[in-house]
Image: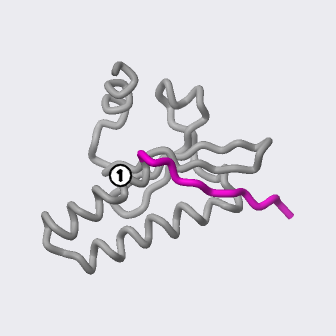
Amino acid sequence: MSEKYEVTITPEAHSDILNIYSYVAVTLKEPRIADKLTARIYKAAYSLDFSSERHPVVDWEPWHSRNIRKFPVGKYMVYYGVDRKLFKVQIVRIFHGGRNVEEIISSENDD
């Protein structure tokens, strides 16, 4: 039996979820869909407590070297890291699948 991992969500990823909720609930005027979508994202994130390495590592730097993995939830991609020694999973960011995440991360690292 595999070890259970502790799943945490970074402030940046939590902010991403709030922004997703706001966009769907306010901009698209679909609060019920926003509730369901954010619940799906949280449920998927916390399901990483077991078999946390089942998703692929991204193929671009600097996240490839940091062993950041990704998986889809609807039209969104959840990015996370795994610490095998401490049995921890950390959700680092969540982006719409159509966004250029490499460019966003690169520009954030330039700041």
**Residue farthest front in this picture:** 11
Instruction: Please determine whether, in this image, residue 24 is positioned above or below residue 53.
Output: below
Hey, which residue is sitting farthest bottom in the picture?
32
| Residue linked to disc 1 | 16
Q: Position of residue 104 (x, y in %)?
A: 32, 32
Magenta range: 1-12
Decide whether residue 78 is among the magenta residues: no
Tell me how the rendering is colored: one colour
Q: Nearer the viewer, residue 39 or 74?
A: 39
Look at 35% across and 28% down and name the residue there.
108
Against 97, residue 103 (above or below) is above
Q: Position of residue 32 (x, y in %)?
A: 26, 80
19 left or right, relative to 63: left
Q: Secondary structure at mark 1?
A: helix
**Image location of residue 38, percent across then percent down:** 38, 68
Left or right? Give the position of 14 relative to 24. right
How crowded pointer 1 is (Cα within 10 Å; few <14, some 14-19, many 20+) is rated as some
**Amino acid beneath label 1:** Asp
Q: Quadrant of the C terminus?
A: top left
Residue 25 placement (x, y as % from top left): 21, 70
